């Protein structure tokens, strides 16, 4: 199966320095935040890759790098073999066609929809922007069709976002994302603001749409139970780097990185009622001043000598990629 999306050694650094005059007075150097460091992965057509990890690990930054909201500081993002950074700046037909292929569903359904626009105008906006349909009657028909895809009606298009529940708003966001006929959807925690029962409805809808339209997903979440339901492969991120990447069954069934094990051990399990769950120990280090060597070493129960000095690189081990000295050299 061919790769639709490819990230090669992608990094993103933000300048978070105080104002220049403050730095001169206080004699401080510039301060840089390495939000994403040397991340590489690919997503096959029709596949769902999930990125998981604690808040601040760089998941959403990766999403914004792929869609072109951020330009990478290093490395490249390619969609369907074309450089996304070039497509974002370009205005020729090839660049516009590539931008249409990639759409994003945002986390908060209450903030991502314009409250002053009717739903029909919200869904029609990408169609008008990309000039896919210019005839008004055909446009109205297409909007009604898109609303039908997400189990809403044409009459719902006459309403405003505040007249809908959170789950319905997220359905509207999905309809808007589908309006440009994309091949690849980036879903940035699309169910985190919803009730559990509504989460299941939205996730099942997304799986149905993927099957019917052949969509490819990058699904970002900190909820491992949601990821287990929807993903084919899972990438675990910690402090801007991938620490484990592999098939969902392998990662969930036999995690190799200690951080992945800690995340899974923290999930409540009804079949283990009475057994104490292990919370994720320690705190995420300050990303402005990360530890030397492996960034996870201050929290790692398997830490040994090399972890303080060297940063482990992703290497294939037991059928998945793992960045851990202890996993490859059990002691």
Image (tube, rainbow, N blue to C red):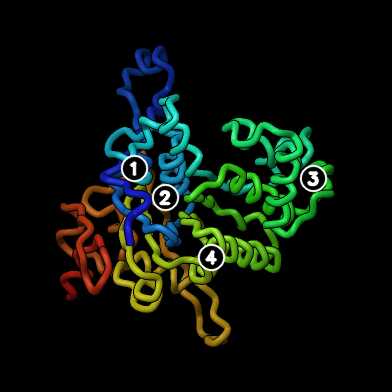
- Return the disc, 3 or 4, that comes first in the chain's sequence: 3
Disc 1 or disc 4, which is closer to the eye?
Answer: 4
| In the depicted structure, whether residue 262 falls above or below residue 288 | below
Q: Decide: marks 2, 1 in contact (CB < 8 A)?
A: no
The residue pinned by badge 2 equals 57
Pointer 3: what residue? 157
Q: Secondary structure at mark 3?
A: helix
Q: Position of residue 69 (x, y in %)?
A: 47, 34
294 w.r.t. 288: above or below = below
Disc number for residue 78 = 1
State left or right for residue 23 relative to residue 165: left
Q: Quadrant of the N terminus?
A: bottom left
Residue 131 is tagged as none
Q: Residue at x 65, y 54 (%)?
A: 193
Q: Residues within 10 Å of mark 3 (few under 14, many from 20)?
A: many
Q: Of tags 2 and 1, which is closer to the observer?
A: 1
Rendered location of residue 219, percent (x, y): 49, 56
Labelled pair 4, 2 in contact (Cβ < 8 Å): no
């Amino acid at each position: 199966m061919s790769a639709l999306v490819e990230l090669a050694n992608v990094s993103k650094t933000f300048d978070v320095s105080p104002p220049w005059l403050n730095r001169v007075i206080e004699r401080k150097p510039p301060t840089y935040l390495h939000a994403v460091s040397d991340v590489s992965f690919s997503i096959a057509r029709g596949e769902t890759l999930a990125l998981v990890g604690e808040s601040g690990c760089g998941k959403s930054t990766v999403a914004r790098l792929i869609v072109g909201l951020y330009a990478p500081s290093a490395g490249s993002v390619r969609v369907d073999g074309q450089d996304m950074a070039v497509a974002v700046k370009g205005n020729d037909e090839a660049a516009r066609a590539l931008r249409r292929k990639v759409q994003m569903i945002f986390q908060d359904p209450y903030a991502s929809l314009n409250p002053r626009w009717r739903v029909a105008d919200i869904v029609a906006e990408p169609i008008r922007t990309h000039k896919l349909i210019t005839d008004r009657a055909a446009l109205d028909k297409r909007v009604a069709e898109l609303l039908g895809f997400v189990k809403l009606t044409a009459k719902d298009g006459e309403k405003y976002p505040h007249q809908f529940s959170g789950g319905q708003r997220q359905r509207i966001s999905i309809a808007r994302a589908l309006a440009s006929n994309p091949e690849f959807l980036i879903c940035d925690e699309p169910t985190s603001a919803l009730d559990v029962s509504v989460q299941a409805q939205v996730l099942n809808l997304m799986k149905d749409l993927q099957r019917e339209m052949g969509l490819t997903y990058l699904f970002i979440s900190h909820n491992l139970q949601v990821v287990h339901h929807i993903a084919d492969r899972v990438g675990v991120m910690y402090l801007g780097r991938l620490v484990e990447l592999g098939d969902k069954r392998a990662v969930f069934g036999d995690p190799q990185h200690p951080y992945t094990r800690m995340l899974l051990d923290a999930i409540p399990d009804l079949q283990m009622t009475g057994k104490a769950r292990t919370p994720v120990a320690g705190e995420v280090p300050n990303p402005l001043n990360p530890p030397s060597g492996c960034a996870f070493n201050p929290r790692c129960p398997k830490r040994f000598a090399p972890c303080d000095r060297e940063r482990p690189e992703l290497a294939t081990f037991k059928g998945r990629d793992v960045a851990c000295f202890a996993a490859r050299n059990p002691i």
